[in-house]
Amino acid sequence: MVVAVEKLLTRAYEPADAAAVADLLNLVDEHAGGHAGTTGQEVDSFVMTLVPDARTDTRLVFAADVLVAAGINAPPPPGGFRVDLIGGVHPDWRGRGLGRTMLAWQIRRAEQMHEEIAPDATWEAHRGIELDDHDAVRLFRRNGMTPVRYWFEMAADTATAPEIPPPDGLTIVAYRPEYESAVHEAHMAAFRDHWGYQYRERAAWAELTVRQNTFRPELSRVVLDGDEVAGYLLATSDPDPSRVHIGLIGVLRPWRRRGLASAMLANVLHAASLAGHTTAALGVDADSLTGAVGVYERVGFRTDHRAVTYSRALS
């Protein structure tokens, strides 16, 4: 079906659009060789938790009943620096100026947010894409955005996971709701020295992680040293029921380089296999200071595809 550009409808995001936005983001990723791993629940939780006002900070473009482009802006938490630009253009609708128009609006709105919230702070607009999304790469470069970080999207066969016990004195347990506060504190401490770190208050962090409908507590782990949290792994469902996604994994500095991350991963891979999942997936910073890529490879993860973050300073 061909719809004239002048027949397009533009409006703000509504909760009923969550599935359509997830489908669009998945189409964009698959078109560039990535995995369709976004769910409608994750989209709605992101918008409801991080977007100040959907009426001003989101924009959807429809051709008849088909969502052909989307743009969502999420400002940083207090003291943060990054405006996350989420969105994309349907592969069948590229080359008509939709991407150029949407990105221009997102950058303009990000600059307005900067002026409204923290004009004296240094802010950047960030957008993550699959490395082989060549249309987006050209668009971003033409609009003054440059690549600032690269990511490996990795996957492992759950049936071939090694047996790796935790280090002496440490215990791996399944996640329970009473661990929420301690795991939040542990995550903020573990990632303080990572690229792109921003402190996020517990309520917002929890809505995006352990309170998500896609969160899998039975496949998530907490490592205890007595009563202290030494590490954690948080898993979520994937639209593909054969897969499970490891969204967050962290080890606090006093317990690093003792094989703790490997033990957590092996433990979860075995549990995922017993639960009927054949594949586990995760994303990792290609330049991680903790040597995470090598850790994951030793447990059986291999790079499936690559992603990149583009950035532009906000005036």
Image (cartoon, grey):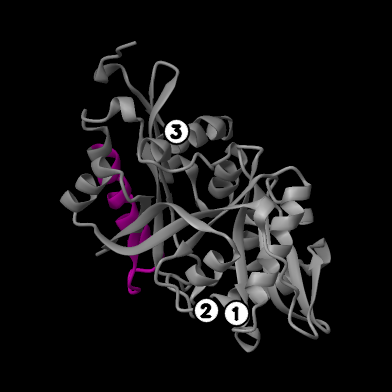
CB-based contact (under 8 Å), mark 1 and mark 2: yes
Q: Is residue 198 visible?
A: no
**Side (left or right) of 154 relative to 272:** left
Q: Residue at x 74, y 42 (%)?
A: 276
Q: How many badges with numbers are in the image?
A: 3
Q: Which residue is mark 3?
A: 24
Q: Nearer the viewer, residue 152 or 294?
A: 294
Tell me the residue that label 2 is attached to. Answer: 192
* First along the sequence among labels 3 and 2: 3
Mark 3 closeness class: few <14, some 14–19, many ≥20 residues within 10 Å: many
The CA distance from mark 3 to mark 2 is 32 Å
Q: Is residue 205 above or below residue 170?
A: above
Q: Residue 196, image x and y in percent?
A: 43, 70
Q: Position of residue 56 (x, y in %)?
A: 42, 44
Q: Are marks 3 and 2 in contact (CB under 8 Å)?
A: no
The magenta span reads 101-125
Tag 1 residue: 189
> On screen, 39 above or below 108?
above
Q: Gap in Å between the C-alphas at discs 1 and 3?
A: 34 Å
Percent x, y of residue 180: 75, 66
The 10 Å Cα crowd at callout 1, few under 14, some 14 to 19, many 20 or more, is some
